[in-house]
Amino acid sequence: MPTTYEMAFMAIASKNSFLTHEEAARCLTEYQSQLAVGPRRSIEDIVSEKGLLTDKQIQIISTATAKVMAQRAAVQASPPPAPSPTKSPSTSRIPTAAPPTPPPSKPGEPIPGIRIVNKLGVGGTATVFLAEDVGHERKVALKIIHPSLAKDEKAVRRFQREAGLLCSFDHLNLVKGYSQGMMGPLSYFLMEYLDGESVQEVLERQKHLSEAQGLEIILETAKAIDHMQSRGIIHRDIKPGNIFLCRDGSVKVLDLGFAQEIKGGDQGEEDTTSGTVQYMSPEQARGQRDLDVRADIYSLGATLYHIVMGELPFSGGDSLEVMAKQVMEALNSSEIKNRRVSKHMHYFIERMMSKDKDLRYSTPHELVEDITEQIKGFKSLEYRPEGSAEATTSTVMGLVKRQEEPPPTTPSTTRRLKPLSPELRRPGGPPTTRRLAPPAPRKLSTLDQMRNRPRKK
């Protein structure tokens, strides 16, 4: 659906707190429900009649909307850019003036004690290398800021803050930072080297994953978010590209470039609409400054949707259209049901992605408890002999691409036991086998029930 003037008008009004997203949605619905014949009221007439905006506010928003639509029209009229080599959704990062020039990669040690082996990848703000930490005899990932950003104080400050956070955190589900410093004019930091793939890379190859695999990935990610919250930090860019699946089955959260303190801190100098629009919470899309961990929970819900559905919850022609949908459009529940998603999965997605943040999980710990109970139900239906290696194997281990191994097979969910001995069989009856009864489903409150609960003052 193309972005219309009215959608852009409401998106700008919501983002700048002239209207709540509920008021914007009601006005947009009223505009779209007008009959095709006869005079139609403009979106400005509707908000004015409802007394939601003053004439001066309407004029300001209309001027801004006209500029946005003119810019979009100019972009659409220009020749299309060359296709990007990556399929990952774009992240609203600080633009670079020119392609980054990597630091010297010839033999030697540009950083004392660190020997660069090869390049692992290039991101929006830095280049990452595989290196050897000679003193500690270990492989490390070396992240060096792009030379084009070396004089950008804001970019350098954000880069160094990410390094400081990773070095201060110590959690199994967060990539570990070792040290940071300067290589000439360039900031760098060392972190643990991870062997595996991001969830985004797995989805590009497999399209979607099973519910059990998706829940385990979300569970481990929620533990990382919970630890960050305990330190007063929110991530603000949770997405499949920032969740890494290691070959040993562990799950790691990466890229704290947009992380910020929940209260105070550097919020005044940060762009509060930072993040990836396809996974961004409504409050982030509106540019609110009072973000809390529930913004990360929404992004985690959008990630879960992508993992099990094989597509993004909201998409559009440009970032503005996607942001408008994040603010105003509800999930298509019938679409989720038609994909034969279980009722528990449906509940998790709808609660995590509620537009009203008061209806989401209030903390990651609460989410971890619910998902843990659901995973126990999955595992109780699988046959895993006691003492076998499979008894403790993560369901995400087989997702990482291994050229030397065949694709992993899904274990049978029916437990078969040996027939009873002849002396224990019923006289004249056939051999008998025992069947395991599935666990009783955990009773979860529906979102409608949650909405009707009296809220604490």
Image (tube, rainbow, N blue to C red):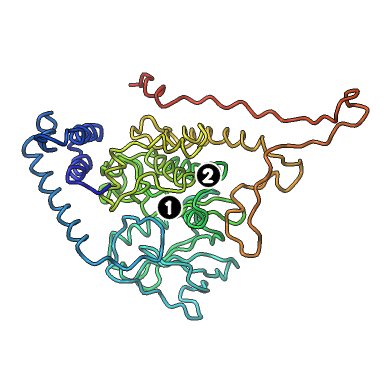
Query: Which three-letter amino acid code belongs to the residue tagged 1?
Result: Leu
Question: Where is residue 368 shown, x and y percent of the image?
Answer: 52, 36
Q: Which mark is residue 165?
A: 1
Quadrant hosting residue 299: top left
Question: Where is residue 147 shown, x and y percent of the image?
Answer: 34, 71
Quadrant hosting residue 229: top left
Relative depth, front residue between 218 and 32 = 32
Quadrant hosting residue 301: top left
Q: Using a 10 Å C-alpha cutoff, classify the residue at mark 1 as few (fewer than 14 neighbours), some (14 to 19) or many (20 or more).
A: some
Q: Which mark is residue 329?
A: none
Q: Residue at x 62, y 54 (%)?
A: 248
Against 48, residue 124 (above or below) is below
Relative depth, front residue between 173 and 328 = 328
Against 32, residue 440 (above or below) is above
Q: Which mark is residue 214?
A: 2
Q: Residue at x 66, y 35 (%)?
A: 380
Query: Which three-letter amino acid code belongs to the residue tagged 2?
Result: Gly
In front: mark 2 or mark 1?
A: 2
Q: Secondary structure at mark 2?
A: helix
Count the marks: 2
Label pair 2/1, CB-CB below 8 angstroms = no
Which quadrant of the figure contains the C terminus?
top left
- Left/right placement of residue 290 relative to residue 432 reads left
Question: Where is residue 238 shown, x and y percent of the image?
Answer: 42, 48
- Left/right placement of residue 453 relative to residue 56 reads right
Relative depth, front residue between 20 and 272 = 20
Question: Where is residue 319 shown, x and y percent of the image?
Answer: 28, 52
In primary-sequence order, the first of circles 2 and 1 is: 1
